[in-house]
Image (tube, helix red, strand yellow):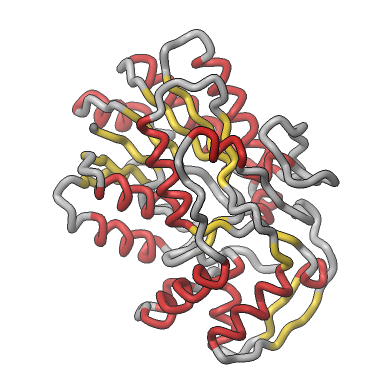
Amino acid sequence: MKICVTGAAGFIGYHLVKRLLRDNHFVIGIDNLNNYYPPKYKSQRIQILKKDKKFKFKKVNLNHPKRLEEIFNQNKFDCIYHLASQPGIMYSFKNPKTYVQNNINATKNLINLTKKYLIKKFYFTSSSSVYGLKKKFPINEKAILKPINIYAKTKLECEKILRENFKFTEVDLKIFRPFTVYGPYGRPDMIFLTFLDKLSKKKDFYLFNNGNYVRDFTYVEDVAEIMALFLNKGILGNYIFNICSGHPLKIIDLISLIEKYIFKKAQIIKRPYRKGEMIKTYGDNQLLKKNIKFNDFTNINDGIKKTIKWYINYKDKKSLVFNKIKY
C-alpha cells in the first residue's frame, strides 16, 4: 500500500511511519519542518526514517496546494494519515491565525486532493481536547463536544469539515482522538521533556493547577500500533475513536514516578489553573477494543522507564528545549 503521512517529522507521525514501514508499506512523509520547536529535532527524526528505502520525505507546506498537488499527481496514494497540525494549547491564545491556517485550511486542501485523486482512505488525528471540561468519566465518543481553547476548536472544525465532505462518498474516514501521548522523541513543549530538562539543569519546574491536573497518559508506540491496525478494517459505522489507556493519573503523581526512576528530586513551584487547560482527561476505549484486537496498553511505569532511557541516551539535548512561549 502507498501511504501519505502528513506531519511525518512530528512526534506521533514519526512513530506511525516507523510502524507502517514494518508492514512493508511505501510511505511518503510530508512536513514543513516549521520552527514551533527546533526544526533540527524534527530533521533528526526524518533522517532515521530515511534509513528505510520504502520511505521518501517531501518538505512541503500544506497551504501550498500547487506544490502539494505535484506530490499527489506523482503518487497514487491508497491512504492519507493526516497528522500535520499546529499544536500547543497556550500558544493558540497568542497566535490564533496560525491554527486556522495550519489546521483548518490545510485540511481543506487535503480533502480537495483526496476527492480529485480518488483516494480511498483518509485518517485524521484529532485530539481529546475537543471534549472540553467534563464531570462524567470515562469520556466516550458520544460525549458533548465543548472545546475550551483555540487549538481544540480548530481540531473540532476539521472533524466537521471531514464528515461533511466524505458523508456521501466511498472514502473510508476515520477520526482518532488521542489522549495525552508521551514517549521517546516527544515534543519539547510537553510535560515529560520540559520536566526532564528542568530536572537535569536543577531549575524550577512550574506545576500548574497545583499539580492536580489528571491525564490519561497513552504511550506513543501504542498509538502508532492502533492507527496502523485500522488500515485493515475498512469502512465502519462508527468512525471516531478515542485512543487512550483508560488509566488516568494526576500530574503530581507522574512527577513522583519520574523522580523515582531517574533518582533525582525536582524543584517544584506550584501555580494556579491556567485558562484553556483541561482539568481532567480520562477516556473510554471500549469502542476501540470492539473494533481492533488491542488490549495491551503500555503500563505507565514501563512507559516512563522507556522514555527516561531514551532521554538519557539522546545526545543532542539542546534541540529538546522549547523556548517559543514565555509564560
In this rendering, the answer to whether 220 lies above or below 212 is above
Q: Is residue 204 left or right of residue 221?
A: right
Q: Is residue 65 left or right of residue 308?
A: left
Residue 24, given in percent of the width and then of the height, sits at 20, 43
The image quadrant that residue 326 belongs to is bottom right
In this rendering, the answer to whether 240 lies above or below 303 is above
Viewer-closest of 168 and 85: 168
Residue 54 visible to an observer of this rendering: yes
Residue 151 visible to an observer of this rendering: no
* Residue visible at 54% across and 40% down in the picture: 289
Residue 175, given in percent of the width and then of the height, sits at 53, 32
Residue 195, given in percent of the width and then of the height, sits at 60, 76
Q: Quadrant of the C terminus?
A: bottom right
* Residue visible at 61% across and 24% down in the picture: 160
Residue 268, given in percent of the width and then of the height, sits at 73, 83
Q: Is residue 89 left or right of residue 243?
A: right
Viewer-closest of 267 and 177: 177
Residue at the left extreme?
53
* Residue visible at 42% across and 53% down in the picture: 10
In this rendering, the answer to whether 255 lies above or below 156 is below
Viewer-closest of 97 and 128: 128
* Residue visible at 22% across and 25% down in the picture: 76
Viewer-closest of 315 and 323: 315
